Image: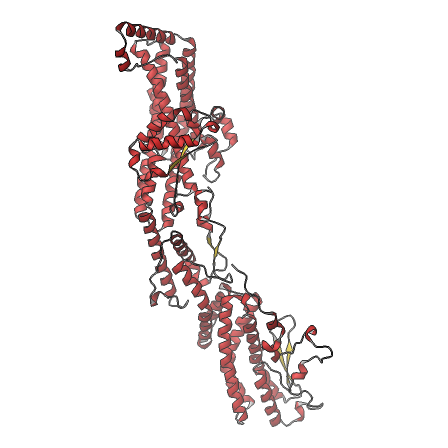
Amino acid sequence: MDPAPATPRWNLERPYLTGRFHQEAKVSAPSQAPGSKSFSLDSFSRGAGGGAGSVLGSYAVSVQELLVIDDLLSALVGIEGRYISIKRVRGKEGYVVFQIDSSMDLALQELTRRIFPLCEDFVLASQFVESRSHFKNGLVNHALAAALRAFLLDYQAMVAQLEHQFRLGRLSVQGLWFFCQRMMSSLNALAVLIEKAMSNNTSGSATLNLLHSQAKAMAGDSAVRSLLEKMTDCASAAYLRMLERWVYEGVIDDPYGEFFIAENKSLQKESLTQDYDAKYWQQRYSLKDGIPSFLNNVAATILTTGKYLNVMRECGHNVQVSLSENSKLTSFGSNHQYLECIKSAYDFASGELLTLVKDKYDLIGKLRSLKRYLLLDQGDFLVHFMDIAREELTKKPEDISVEKLQSLVDIALRSTAAASDPSHEDLTCCVERSSLLKKLTTLKDLDCAYSSDKLAAADVDQPMTLNITGLETFCLGYKIPWPLSLVISRKALTKYQLIFRLLFHCKHVSRQLCQAWQIQQGFRSVKILGTPILRSSILCRSMLKFVNSFLHYLTFEVLEPNWHSMHGRLQTARSIDEVIQIHDFFLQKCLKECLLLLPELLMKVEKLKALCLQYATSIQLLIPSIEVAAPESKSKSLSSRARAKRSQDRDEQLKLASENAVMSHSILKFESEFNAELQSLVPTLSKSSQAEPYLTHLAQCILGVGIDQ
């Protein structure tokens, strides 16, 4: 907001331009010419030089009345007379006290003093009009000052009429008192208002609130209440223009900072896709203190309406609110017409933005695409990518080429059914520098209790940190354009990525176990079924069942039902805020039901997966040279003698492997650790399912694995 223009110095230093010369002649010392005579209040009194002894009490009562009426007519417009003087109240700008010559007839003194409050109120009102017309006081005070100025013109016209009657010899002090009665109550009510406004230095909405409260307080005096309501309407006009521009155009036209909505221009929409803690939508436009009392109940609606219009303008969408006579904000009157206008503007802006986001920017299509890739709904793409990127993903994160991974992602997309998806080009990839559990400790707003101490105590993340590869840190990303970034922000995308990393790693563990299972089948083909081999086969099957049961739970018990629930609710959403709320609720619910917000359970699952990976790796290392199933095409190209020799060599290798003491010991160790971890998970899961019913399905899957053994 630009600073208010300064009031010209000459306007403050030359009293003859401001009207204050009626009350005092102020000539500053620096502006006086050398040797010039300074002016005083007495030099402007009509009695100046009138001679000593011209006291009012020396005249007859009838003459005193004529003299005091002449002075009163001047006092009514803030000018001193011969026998009525003005004394300023120290420390209170604009406050004056009128004094009368004490030699006057007592009856006349009493009547005269009754009129003095009207004179003092006029001076106070004049001072307010003058001081509140400066730029710095804002448009509401400017409008109120203009309304008061118009009222004071009527008041001065009344004084002129009274003076005319006095010149015709038709006005007495009693008559003057009578004619002032109607104006006295009105000007007194305005003086009370002005006194409160000046003491609290109100502006903007504070001035409007004061006007409203004063009008309500005058419910018993219809004339005064009508006057205050008229002042309120005049003062509200400028505020209404600001409100109209905001709810019909989304523009803050507030040169003096009076409007109750503030704009933080430092927050840019680009932060939504870059900053996890971006506050653009919550804080780019926000409510300030000092909301007008009559707008308290609709302040949030007004704020939201302008925000929606701003989004559309940022998109280059032409927003044209149809304005009719009924939709114009004319006043904040008791008929509450302005509330209907605000509601209509909100309905228009909300519907228009929602249609724009859903139709032009295809929000539902983008969400489906996110489900397809980041929630692993596109199976063939993932399998193909894991096959062609295996070599790169087995490297340490710092050694991985993200560019190469991106090209492999593109190849996998083009060579599978994903190529038909128009949004597949928005898919990107990245490699994190920490494991999933470590990542969760850095996100403090997820409403979970992860801590580095707990991770160290659980001894889950320590070995993984040393041998971490791209398989644990690989993650897909997505390019989100404005205004879809309002819904799919950096924070929302991060939550998708957390779920993706959990699913991707589970898929990797499952693939590794499948390879170990294929090796087990080599023993079965030559009927070598010793105790170590049988135990290994059973253990591998149990591990596979555990991992696949967990994957089945994540996919069909969590993601699919929650997705369909969200999709159904989005169809009936009525505003972009409701869409954001529904989407955020979906992600939070998925995170929780995927155990990502339950540290104790997730750590146990991660430990079990780590054991499965170690087992699969050990099997492949202990029997590195066995070809479990030679391709048929190659077998046919060999001679019968070569095939027989090869089969015999393989059988011998398998027999040696089955009798390998290291292998036997390793299998027993893995079996013991896996069963112990699995058994420790079951009671924890069963206990948690009492508080979290969705875990019942997972508990049944895990219990099934345990019973099978």
The image quadrant where one finds the C terminus is top left
Colour style of the rendered protein structure: secondary structure
Quadrant of res 38 = bottom right
Task: Tell me if residue 514 can be seen.
Answer: yes
Q: Is residue 699 above or below residue 177?
A: above
| 108 left or right, relative to 408 | right
User: Seen in the image, is 398 located left or right of residue 341?
Assistant: right
For this orientation, the residue located farthest to the right is: 35
Query: Can see residue 700?
Result: no
With 568 as the anchor, is 494 left or right in this view? right
| Frontmost residue, 578 versus 192 | 578
Percent across and percent down for residue 392 are: 42, 26
Name the image quarter holding residue 651: top left
Q: Quadrant of residue 4?
A: bottom right
- At 43% from the left and 28% from the top, the residue drawn is 470
Percent from the top left, x then y, of residue 287?
47, 55
Task: Pick whichever, 501 or 457, lies toward us.
Answer: 501
- Count of labels in the image: 0
Question: x%, y% of residue 90?
Answer: 65, 72
The x and y percentages for residue 342 are 38, 61
